[in-house]
Amino acid sequence: MNAGPTRVGDLLGDLLEKRGLGTQLRRLGALDVWSGAVGARVAEVTEAKTVVASTLFVEVRSSAWLMELSLMKEALLERVNAELGGERTIDRIVLTLMEGDES
């Protein structure tokens, strides 16, 4: 019984999932969706830098913005996860001050 050819994309997706890499690739998607998820005003003063495990690291342009965004972390987290498909793909956001950019 021949099921026919299998698409390479399907095989790759299955392999990534088996190796646990599919989840990390979805998490890395947070870097791509950050600007759209948080809106232009916040995106203008931030830069999503990296994802380690389920934590998104974001640099913030000024200490004033860092303070304000710290109060909004849970809402930002919800927006990013919504952009990633609604699951709790990212568990935490860590905000840090951009070096040499205190404006």
Image: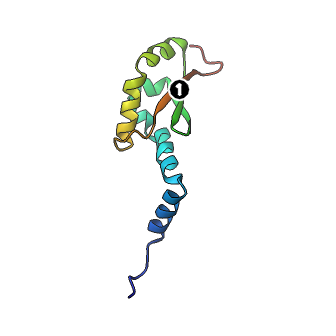
The 10 Å Cα crowd at callout 1, few under 14, some 14 to 19, many 20 or more, is: few
Residue sitting at x 65%, y 18%: 100
Secondary structure of the residue carrying tag 1 is strand
Looking at the picture, does residue 67 appear above or below residue 75? above
Residue sitting at x 35%, y 44%: 85
Image location of residue 29, percent across then percent down: 47, 44
Front position in the image: 77 or 44: 77
Looking at the picture, does residue 91 appear above or below residue 96? below
Image location of residue 18, percent across then percent down: 51, 59
Position of the C terminus, as image quadrant, is top right
Residue lying at the far bottom of the rendered structure: 1
Looking at the picture, does residue 16 appear above or below residue 98? below
Looking at the picture, does residue 30 appear above or below residue 103? below
Residue sitting at x 51%, y 43%: 28
Question: Residue beneath label 1, please?
Answer: 94
The answer to whether residue 74 is left or right of residue 96 is left
**What colouring style does the render use?**
rainbow
Residue sitting at x 53%, y 26%: 94
Residue lying at the far top of the rendered structure: 64
Image location of residue 23, percent across then percent down: 48, 49
Could you tell me the amino acid type at mark 1?
Val
Image location of residue 50, percent across then percent down: 57, 36
Position of the N terminus, as image quadrant, is bottom left
